Amino acid sequence: MKHVKGRLDESILVCVYYGQNGERLIRRGHKLATLLDCPLYVLTVDSKPIDAFDAEKSGYIEQWKELTDELEVEQFIIKDNEKRPFHKVITEIAMDFNITQIIVGQSAQSRWEEITKGSFLNVLLKEVPFVDFHIVSVKRPSEDELIDVYEKGVRAYIIQENDYYKVVFTCPKIVALEGIFFKEIGTDFDNGIFKFNYNGKLLEADITEGTVNNPEILPKDRFTSLKP
Protein backbone atom coordinates (compact mmCIF):
# COMPACT_ATOMS: atom_id res chain seq x y z
CA MET A 1 0.00 0.00 0.00
CA LYS A 2 1.58 3.25 -1.14
CA HIS A 3 1.19 6.67 0.42
CA VAL A 4 -2.10 8.15 -0.75
CA LYS A 5 -1.71 11.29 -2.84
CA GLY A 6 -2.92 14.71 -1.80
CA ARG A 7 -6.25 15.18 -3.52
CA LEU A 8 -8.93 12.93 -1.99
CA ASP A 9 -12.08 14.25 -3.68
CA GLU A 10 -11.09 12.24 -6.78
CA SER A 11 -9.97 8.60 -6.92
CA ILE A 12 -9.42 6.46 -10.03
CA LEU A 13 -9.87 2.72 -10.56
CA VAL A 14 -8.45 0.92 -13.62
CA CYS A 15 -10.01 -2.48 -14.39
CA VAL A 16 -7.75 -4.93 -16.25
CA TYR A 17 -8.39 -8.54 -17.08
CA TYR A 18 -6.30 -10.07 -19.84
CA GLY A 19 -3.97 -9.19 -22.67
CA GLN A 20 -1.62 -6.40 -23.63
CA ASN A 21 -4.43 -3.86 -23.41
CA GLY A 22 -3.98 -3.96 -19.63
CA GLU A 23 -0.76 -1.95 -19.74
CA ARG A 24 -2.40 0.68 -21.92
CA LEU A 25 -5.28 1.03 -19.47
CA ILE A 26 -2.95 1.35 -16.48
CA ARG A 27 -0.82 4.00 -18.19
CA ARG A 28 -3.97 5.93 -19.18
CA GLY A 29 -5.14 5.81 -15.57
CA HIS A 30 -1.75 6.97 -14.30
CA LYS A 31 -1.73 9.91 -16.69
CA LEU A 32 -5.16 11.00 -15.51
CA ALA A 33 -4.29 10.47 -11.85
CA THR A 34 -1.14 12.57 -12.28
CA LEU A 35 -3.14 15.40 -13.84
CA LEU A 36 -5.66 15.31 -11.00
CA ASP A 37 -3.06 14.56 -8.30
CA CYS A 38 -5.30 11.82 -6.92
CA PRO A 39 -4.99 8.16 -5.86
CA LEU A 40 -4.92 5.43 -8.51
CA TYR A 41 -5.99 1.80 -7.94
CA VAL A 42 -5.76 -1.12 -10.35
CA LEU A 43 -8.14 -4.08 -10.14
CA THR A 44 -8.13 -7.47 -11.83
CA VAL A 45 -10.87 -10.04 -11.25
CA ASP A 46 -10.86 -13.71 -12.18
CA SER A 47 -13.15 -16.65 -11.47
CA LYS A 48 -10.14 -18.96 -11.14
CA PRO A 49 -7.85 -19.12 -8.08
CA ILE A 50 -4.53 -17.42 -8.74
CA ASP A 51 -2.57 -20.67 -8.57
CA ALA A 52 -4.71 -22.01 -11.44
CA PHE A 53 -3.85 -19.18 -13.85
CA ASP A 54 -2.16 -20.33 -17.03
CA ALA A 55 1.37 -19.16 -17.84
CA GLU A 56 0.15 -16.33 -20.07
CA LYS A 57 -2.25 -14.90 -17.49
CA SER A 58 0.37 -15.24 -14.72
CA GLY A 59 2.80 -13.38 -16.97
CA TYR A 60 0.37 -10.50 -17.39
CA ILE A 61 -0.18 -10.35 -13.62
CA GLU A 62 3.58 -10.04 -13.07
CA GLN A 63 3.86 -7.33 -15.75
CA TRP A 64 1.01 -5.37 -14.16
CA LYS A 65 2.58 -5.71 -10.70
CA GLU A 66 5.90 -4.37 -11.97
CA LEU A 67 4.19 -1.53 -13.82
CA THR A 68 2.06 -0.50 -10.83
CA ASP A 69 5.18 -0.50 -8.63
CA GLU A 70 7.04 1.58 -11.20
CA LEU A 71 4.18 4.09 -11.44
CA GLU A 72 3.68 4.11 -7.65
CA VAL A 73 0.05 3.08 -7.88
CA GLU A 74 -1.63 3.10 -4.47
CA GLN A 75 -2.75 -0.53 -4.67
CA PHE A 76 -2.89 -3.36 -7.18
CA ILE A 77 -5.94 -5.40 -6.17
CA ILE A 78 -6.30 -9.04 -7.26
CA LYS A 79 -9.70 -10.65 -6.72
CA ASP A 80 -9.19 -14.29 -7.68
CA ASN A 81 -11.46 -17.32 -7.22
CA GLU A 82 -14.36 -14.87 -7.51
CA LYS A 83 -17.78 -16.45 -7.93
CA ARG A 84 -19.82 -13.25 -8.13
CA PRO A 85 -20.45 -11.44 -11.45
CA PHE A 86 -17.52 -9.12 -12.09
CA HIS A 87 -19.64 -5.97 -12.02
CA LYS A 88 -20.57 -6.78 -8.40
CA VAL A 89 -16.89 -6.95 -7.45
CA ILE A 90 -16.10 -3.68 -9.23
CA THR A 91 -19.02 -2.00 -7.46
CA GLU A 92 -17.76 -3.23 -4.08
CA ILE A 93 -14.23 -1.95 -4.72
CA ALA A 94 -15.56 1.39 -5.99
CA MET A 95 -17.48 1.88 -2.74
CA ASP A 96 -14.64 0.65 -0.49
CA PHE A 97 -12.10 3.03 -2.02
CA ASN A 98 -14.44 5.97 -2.70
CA ILE A 99 -13.77 5.71 -6.43
CA THR A 100 -15.03 8.60 -8.54
CA GLN A 101 -13.70 7.53 -11.96
CA ILE A 102 -13.35 4.08 -13.54
CA ILE A 103 -11.32 3.17 -16.63
CA VAL A 104 -12.28 0.05 -18.58
CA GLY A 105 -11.42 -1.37 -22.01
CA GLN A 106 -13.75 -1.67 -24.98
CA SER A 107 -13.22 -3.74 -28.12
CA ALA A 108 -13.92 -1.82 -31.31
CA GLN A 109 -15.62 -4.68 -33.11
CA SER A 110 -18.20 -5.29 -30.38
CA ARG A 111 -19.53 -1.76 -30.02
CA TRP A 112 -22.59 -2.14 -32.24
CA GLU A 113 -23.48 -5.47 -30.64
CA GLU A 114 -23.25 -3.95 -27.17
CA ILE A 115 -25.39 -0.95 -28.19
CA THR A 116 -28.12 -3.25 -29.46
CA LYS A 117 -27.97 -5.94 -26.78
CA GLY A 118 -26.90 -4.02 -23.72
CA SER A 119 -23.41 -4.16 -22.28
CA PHE A 120 -21.18 -4.69 -19.31
CA LEU A 121 -20.81 -0.91 -19.11
CA ASN A 122 -24.57 -0.41 -18.96
CA VAL A 123 -24.74 -2.78 -16.00
CA LEU A 124 -21.96 -0.86 -14.25
CA LEU A 125 -23.69 2.47 -14.88
CA LYS A 126 -26.72 1.18 -13.01
CA GLU A 127 -24.65 -0.31 -10.19
CA VAL A 128 -22.39 2.71 -9.58
CA PRO A 129 -24.18 5.82 -10.88
CA PHE A 130 -21.93 8.02 -8.74
CA VAL A 131 -18.84 7.18 -10.86
CA ASP A 132 -17.62 8.66 -14.16
CA PHE A 133 -16.45 6.12 -16.75
CA HIS A 134 -13.61 6.32 -19.26
CA ILE A 135 -13.70 3.80 -22.12
CA VAL A 136 -10.33 3.06 -23.71
CA SER A 137 -10.66 1.47 -27.15
CA VAL A 138 -8.59 -1.49 -28.22
CA LYS A 139 -6.72 -0.90 -31.47
CA ARG A 140 -9.18 -1.23 -34.36
CA PRO A 141 -8.33 -4.22 -36.58
CA SER A 142 -7.60 -3.85 -40.27
CA GLU A 143 -10.14 -4.95 -42.90
CA ASP A 144 -8.40 -8.31 -43.31
CA GLU A 145 -8.42 -8.90 -39.56
CA LEU A 146 -12.12 -8.22 -39.04
CA ILE A 147 -13.00 -11.85 -39.68
CA ASP A 148 -10.92 -12.82 -36.65
CA VAL A 149 -13.35 -11.43 -34.10
CA TYR A 150 -12.86 -14.31 -31.69
CA GLU A 151 -9.92 -16.17 -30.28
CA LYS A 152 -9.53 -19.89 -30.86
CA GLY A 153 -12.37 -21.79 -29.18
CA VAL A 154 -11.69 -23.60 -25.90
CA ARG A 155 -13.69 -26.28 -24.13
CA ALA A 156 -15.88 -24.77 -21.44
CA TYR A 157 -18.92 -25.47 -19.29
CA ILE A 158 -22.00 -23.56 -18.20
CA ILE A 159 -22.98 -24.00 -14.56
CA GLN A 160 -25.82 -22.51 -12.54
CA GLU A 161 -25.01 -20.40 -9.48
CA ASN A 162 -28.12 -19.07 -7.77
CA ASP A 163 -29.88 -16.99 -10.45
CA TYR A 164 -26.88 -16.82 -12.79
CA TYR A 165 -25.47 -19.12 -15.44
CA LYS A 166 -21.70 -18.83 -15.65
CA VAL A 167 -18.87 -20.10 -17.85
CA VAL A 168 -16.12 -22.17 -16.24
CA PHE A 169 -13.11 -23.74 -17.89
CA THR A 170 -12.42 -26.79 -15.73
CA CYS A 171 -14.81 -29.73 -15.66
CA PRO A 172 -17.07 -29.09 -12.66
CA LYS A 173 -18.27 -31.77 -10.24
CA ILE A 174 -21.83 -30.49 -10.55
CA VAL A 175 -24.26 -30.74 -13.46
CA ALA A 176 -23.07 -28.59 -16.34
CA LEU A 177 -23.58 -27.90 -20.01
CA GLU A 178 -20.50 -28.63 -22.12
CA GLY A 179 -19.57 -26.60 -25.18
CA ILE A 180 -16.95 -24.38 -26.81
CA PHE A 181 -16.26 -20.81 -25.69
CA PHE A 182 -15.02 -18.23 -28.21
CA LYS A 183 -13.64 -15.14 -26.50
CA GLU A 184 -13.78 -11.79 -28.28
CA ILE A 185 -10.35 -10.58 -29.32
CA GLY A 186 -9.18 -7.56 -27.34
CA THR A 187 -11.72 -7.67 -24.52
CA ASP A 188 -10.62 -7.40 -20.90
CA PHE A 189 -13.28 -9.78 -19.59
CA ASP A 190 -14.73 -13.17 -20.56
CA ASN A 191 -16.91 -11.70 -23.30
CA GLY A 192 -17.82 -13.81 -26.30
CA ILE A 193 -20.06 -16.68 -27.35
CA PHE A 194 -20.60 -20.20 -26.01
CA LYS A 195 -21.64 -22.77 -28.63
CA PHE A 196 -23.23 -26.08 -27.70
CA ASN A 197 -25.24 -28.90 -29.24
CA TYR A 198 -28.75 -29.71 -28.01
CA ASN A 199 -31.20 -32.07 -29.67
CA GLY A 200 -29.11 -32.07 -32.83
CA LYS A 201 -29.00 -28.28 -33.11
CA LEU A 202 -26.01 -25.96 -32.65
CA LEU A 203 -27.04 -23.18 -30.27
CA GLU A 204 -25.21 -20.07 -29.15
CA ALA A 205 -25.26 -18.26 -25.80
CA ASP A 206 -24.04 -14.67 -25.48
CA ILE A 207 -21.50 -14.22 -22.68
CA THR A 208 -20.63 -10.99 -20.88
CA GLU A 209 -17.99 -11.01 -18.13
CA GLY A 210 -18.43 -14.75 -17.75
CA THR A 211 -22.22 -14.73 -17.34
CA VAL A 212 -24.87 -15.84 -19.86
CA ASN A 213 -26.87 -12.87 -21.22
CA ASN A 214 -29.62 -14.94 -22.82
CA PRO A 215 -30.30 -17.78 -20.34
CA GLU A 216 -33.62 -18.53 -22.04
CA ILE A 217 -31.68 -20.37 -24.75
CA LEU A 218 -30.18 -22.86 -22.29
CA PRO A 219 -31.80 -26.32 -21.95
CA LYS A 220 -33.11 -26.09 -18.38
CA ASP A 221 -33.44 -29.87 -18.07
CA ARG A 222 -29.61 -29.99 -17.92
CA PHE A 223 -29.70 -28.04 -14.64
CA THR A 224 -32.71 -29.58 -12.86
CA SER A 225 -30.59 -31.44 -10.32
CA LEU A 226 -29.23 -28.11 -9.07
CA LYS A 227 -32.63 -26.87 -7.98
CA PRO A 228 -33.92 -27.51 -4.45
Image (spheres, grey):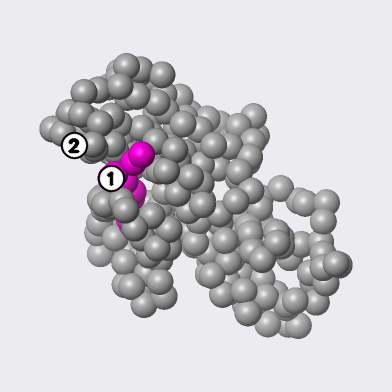
Mark 1 residue element: strand
Residue 82's spot in the image, x, y percent? 61, 43
Dividing the picture into quarters, in which one does residue 147 lie? bottom left
Residue 210 as seen in the image, left or right of residue 91: right
Q: What type is the residue that disc 2 sits on?
A: Leu
164 relative to 42, above or below: below
Q: Residue at x 33, y 73 (%)?
A: 115
Label 1 sits on residue = 101
Distance between the Cα atoms at labels 2 and 1? 10 Å
Q: Earlier in the sequence, mark 2 or mark 1?
A: 2
Q: Which residues are magenta?
A: 98-107
Dividing the picture into quarters, in which one does residue 179 lie? bottom right
Question: Given this view, does label 2 or label 1 mark the residue nearer the observer?
Answer: 1
- Please tell me the numbered disc located at residue 32: 2
Residue 209 as seen in the image, left or right of residue 138: right
Image quadrant containing the C terminus: bottom right
